[in-house]
Image (cartoon, rainbow, N blue to C red):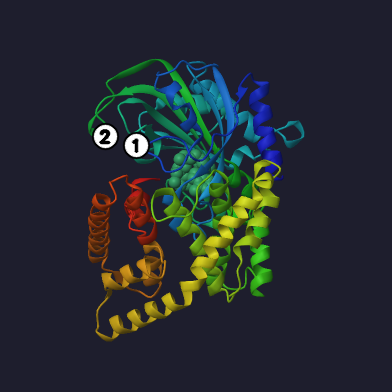
Amino acid sequence: MQTHEIVRRFTDHFVAAGHTRVPSASLILDDPNLLFVNAGMVQFKPYFLGEVPAPYPTATSIQKCVRTGDIDEVGRTTRHNTFFQMAGNFSFGDYFKAGAIAHAWKLITGSQDEGGYGFDPERLWVTVYLDDDEAIELWRDIAGLPPERIQRRDGKDNYWDMGVPGPGGPCSEIYYDRGPEFGAEGGPVADENRYLEIWNLVFMQDVRGDLSPKAGHPPIGKLPRPNIDTGMGVERVATLLQGVDNVYETDLVRPVIARAEEFSGRRYGADAEDDVRFRVIADHARSGVMIIGDGVTPSNEGRGYVLRRLLRRIVRSARLLGVTEPVLGAFAEVVRDAMAPSYPELVTDFERISAVVRAEEEAFLQTLTAGERIFDTAVAETRRSGAAVLPGDRAFQLHDTYGFPIDLTLEMAAEAGLEVDRDRFTALMQEQRTRAKADAAKHKVGHGGDGSIYRALLDTHGAVDFLGYTELAAEG
Ligand code: ATP
Ligand code: MG
Ligand code: MG
Ligand code: MG
């Protein structure tokens, strides 16, 4: 079943059950806690928080999501994209646990001839929060799930809150058993590779006060009218329904792998290390295009930095596959063609998107070879001295002069079995920033202080707030 069909069936199912169809929000919402929208519920937060009354009792959406926290998993697990689509159904004080469970079960186990996904019920497992006996009973009564395929899990995986005092509640997640060739028995608690998580149902029933640490602070009350928030991973369902090994081989991602094979003359499936590179390229090309589509351009901070890292990582991965010519424009075309049926704006905006990726690649290719030489020399020197840590000065030089995002240097160092002196790197970044500010202040006085010189200096020196790994670590 093609991804477009999976998405269509999801929407049809919930619209037929009275849900209002709500379009995906942009990946960029004005939310101080989020770099990118990372779940379907984000655009509905004001309703869940009670700040604004919900304009409909129930809703359904297919939300574009980016999870930068999953970037290191990409290509190495079978199930993590940086960009993916989350299909969701939401109840704002309307139906609760029984309704959410009945809806999900009907859609995934319903026969394909009648609009369902046709999953074999015998291969489905669920998890529930530690003390959520009510959910266990509902899974038994509504879905007929035997107790041995219902597992209790603690708050790390199965309790959800918004990170601020307010609504929270237990979750229940649905997993599909891919079989013994994917790992050991024992259910999702034992192995999340064999048991693939496809859908998370959040039962928003509590009012939370102090949030830290969760376990030590039970909720301070119950919501008078509880809510439902769910998220189903479209690429994960596609992986299963298309009978492929992983999310990168599904119909909307795999074409980029094919294009990379043409460029490199190498074959996907021939070498484990190359395969990771093919998957990284395919995943990042898609997230890069989608992020640019929503208006972000590469820069040294925040979202622009994430984008830069994704794009430069593609370029370097292609290089490791033996490709030296520019690739990003061609990959962007493949992504456009795959994604356009759902996101027609990719076609109308393509000139802009293409110009952004081409310029970024051109800039990086100008310094990449020289930077790699600096890096190799630094690795050789470090090894010769018997140390295991690359000097922070080198990481700074690579960042400042050769445009290597620090995370790329960290990754390359890890590949060489080395660490990087991050403290020294951060100190140098800080020094540079202070210097730029001082320069700017000097110029400001001389020019009547309208601030434009300051801006120009920041632009040319690139001395901007560095949010690299602190941002990445804070999310996901
Ligand atoms: P995992 O444990 O596999 O990392 P998660 O528990 O972090 O997933 P949720 O936050 O529960 O995921 O998100 C809801 C659903 O979105 C998941 O059940 C899964 O199907 C899908 N999903 C989550 N993260 C990703 C990702 N990085 N790539 C593709 N699909 C994802
Ligand atoms: Mg999980
Ligand atoms: Mg989950
Ligand atoms: Mg996760």
Contact (Cβ within 8 Å) of mark 1 with mark 2: yes
Q: Residue at x 71, y 43 (%)?
A: 341
Q: Residue at x 39, y 22 (%)?
A: 49
Instruction: Tell me if 435 is positioned left or right of 173 in this view.
Output: left
In the image, is residue 159 above or below residue 469? above
Q: Position of residue 108 (x, y in %)?
A: 63, 35
In this view, the residue farthest toward the bottom is 384
Q: Which mark is residue 308?
A: none
Q: Amino acid at mark 1?
A: Gly
In the image, is residue 120 above or below residue 334? above
- Which one is earlier in the sequence, the residue at label 1 or at label 2? 1
Q: Amino acid at mark 2?
A: Ala
Measure the C-alpha gap from mark 1 to mark 2: 7 Å
Q: Position of residue 344 (x, y in %)?
A: 68, 41
Q: Badge 1 is on which residue?
A: 155
Q: Badge 2 is on which residue?
A: 215
Q: Name the residue nearer the viewer: 385 or 221.
A: 385
Q: Name the residue nearer the viewer: 90 or 35.
A: 35
In the image, is residue 155 above or below residue 54? below
10 Å crowding of disc 2: few (<14), some (14-19), many (20+): few
